[in-house]
Amino acid sequence: MSTVGTEVRNILVVGSGAMGRQIGMAAAVAGFAVAVYDINAGAVQDAEHDMRTWLDGRLAKGKMDAAAAAEAWKRIGFTSELAPAAATADLVIEAATEKLEVKKAIFRQLDELAPKHAILATNSSTLGSSAVAGSTGRPAQVCNMHFFNPALVMKAVEIVRHEQTSDQTVDTASSVVRAMGKSPILLNREIPGFIANRLMAAVRNEALSLLQAEVASVADIDAAAKDALGYPMGPFELMDLVGLDVSYLIRQAAYEQTGDAADLPHPLLQEKYEAGEFGRKTGKGWYDYA
Ligand code: NAD
């Protein structure tokens, strides 16, 4: 079983949605003992079923041997009871619904239920951990651990410290990330969008400006990103995959945080959003999927 830094053995993941289940599974495969908790019993069942299917797929493809898969499965549990899972956690990674009030309430509960030494991290993409640290009596042990989707595949984890986060917390979080076979990316301070999403936003905005100026078509701008820059997907393809509604709302949230007009959703993105053309999920976005 993995132990790193300040002896992290047990990890609790709060929220078993798209991110939480995969973060938990990745940690279990890496050797940590993991509990994945959700307030919604249906989401717990769904996550367990989904992760079992993922593990069976790894076995079937010969990417994992039977003994390793059985060990990983033994190390992970799915639950809708918070208190017992929190009581033994050395590290909690919160990946619950992106609402500040929900997260504040979770951090208040975790502060009561988790051992004093436990680190409380949030996977939030848009909320810096300073927004929840004040709901705990241990702000030095609070940070962001921002995984990327799909968390079982993506290597990067942005570790974002707020003003009171201790070096020890950053070191331990980084060690856990490395033990998961992933790369920690350290941010010395909070900034909306962190690093990777800011880089992505800059590329996306430039792509939208080029389209608006009628310099090239959607497909040709995507081809430049893929065939000249080596991106796995063009910015328009990626927006269609993520959902234009999600892309729009993220920009809107960034603008609300910064008040900087440069963060507003691009007018072309706004048009798509208002037309309800959200990409693959609606059958039409920048491309037609009908
Ligand atoms: P999701 O909607 O798929 O899952 C959220 C889960 O949280 C749901 O199952 C819900 O039942 C649960 N939940 C709500 N309130 C709870 C509570 N009080 N206690 C426990 N569980 C609760 O969301 P997601 O896409 O997995 O995102 C979760 C977090 O991860 C968000 O903070 C988001 O910003 C961040 N994130 C998402 C992505 C992404 O691409 N989806 C990428 C990086 C980070």
Image (cartoon, rainbow, N blue to C red):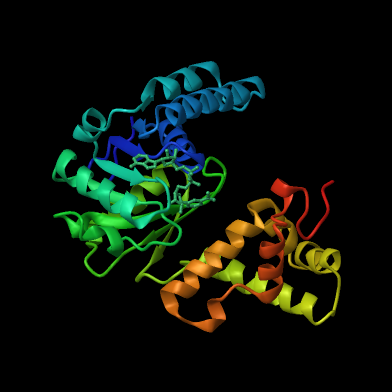
| Residue sitting nearer the eye, 207 or 11 | 207
Q: Is residue 234 visible?
A: no
Q: Quadrant of residue 57?
A: top right
**Residue depicted at x 53% and y 63%:** 250
Q: Is residue 31 above or below residue 184?
A: above
Residue 138: percent from left, percent from top = 16, 55
Q: Quadrant of residue 206?
A: bottom right
Give the image quadrant in which the ligand numbered 1 is located.
Answer: top left
Q: Quadrant of the N terminus?
A: top left
| 128 with respect to 245 (left or right) | left
Q: Is residue 166 visible?
A: yes
| Residue sitting nearer the eye, 160 or 111 | 111
**Residue depicted at x 44% and y 70%:** 192
Residue 9: percent from left, percent from top = 28, 35
Q: Is residue 201 above or below residue 276?
A: below
Residue placed farthest to the front in the image?
A: 275
| 259 with respect to 236 (left or right) | left
Q: Is residue 78 above or below residue 282?
A: above
| 272 with respect to 146 (left or right) | right
Residue 278: percent from left, percent from top = 69, 55
| 10 with respect to 72 (left or right) | left
Residue 61: percent from left, percent from top = 67, 24
| Residue sitting nearer the eye, 91 or 69 | 91
